[in-house]
Amino acid sequence: QVQLEESGGGSVQAGGSQRLSCTVDISVFNFWRMGWHRQVPGRERELVAEMIADGRTNYADSVKGRFTISRDDVKNALYLEMNNLKPEDSAVYYCMGTGRNRFDYWGQGTQVTVSS
């Protein structure tokens, strides 16, 4: 069973920065896509940022210019650098990877809380 584990969540004030990390117990080359999603209670999980295997990235409009996704192929890790955080960024953030078999693997999530 593939395991993804997030870390780096917590509380931060609006305007601050936070970096989320996701470590994977297999090579990231096993995924054709990796990304970060987030969810708040009562709402659907939404895509925040994703990175395709060739390095292309996609971001939600709400985070463009503030968040940066990156990947470390040696450490088998995925990161999300979040700057100029806003209260509306508060959510549980999930790391995910889509395997070559098109199956989606998810982490357990990490809470990010941004206070105004």
Image: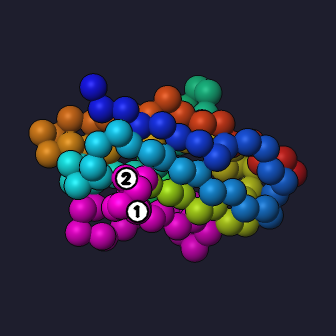
Magenta range is 50-77
Q: Which label is found at residue 76?
A: 2
Q: Which label is found at residue 93?
A: none
List the residue tagged with mark 1. Answer: 72
Which colour style is shown?
A: rainbow
Question: Looking at this rendering, what residue extends furthest in the bottom direction?
Answer: 65
CA separation in Å, label 2 and label 1: 6 Å
Residue name at image x 68 percent, y 66 percent? 83
Residue name at image x 84 percent, y 47 percent? 115
Q: Position of residue 75 (x, y in %)?
A: 41, 56
Q: In this image, 81 relative to 10: left or right?
A: left
Q: Position of residue 45 (x, y in %)?
A: 47, 36
Q: In this image, 111 relative to 71: left or right?
A: right
Residue 46 visible somewhere in the drawing:
no
Quadrant, the N terminus: top left
User: Is 99 drawn above or below residue 84 in the view shown?
Assistant: above
Membership of 64 in magenta stretch: yes
Q: Position of residue 67 (x, y in %)?
A: 57, 65
Residue nearest the viewer, comparing 62 with 6: 6
Give the residue type that dot 2 points to: Asn
User: Is 116 drawn above or below residue 106 in the view shown?
Assistant: below
Give the residue type that dot 1 points to: Asp
Residue 29 visible somewhere in the drawing:
yes
Label 2 close to label 1 by CB (< 8 Å)? yes
Label 2 element class = loop
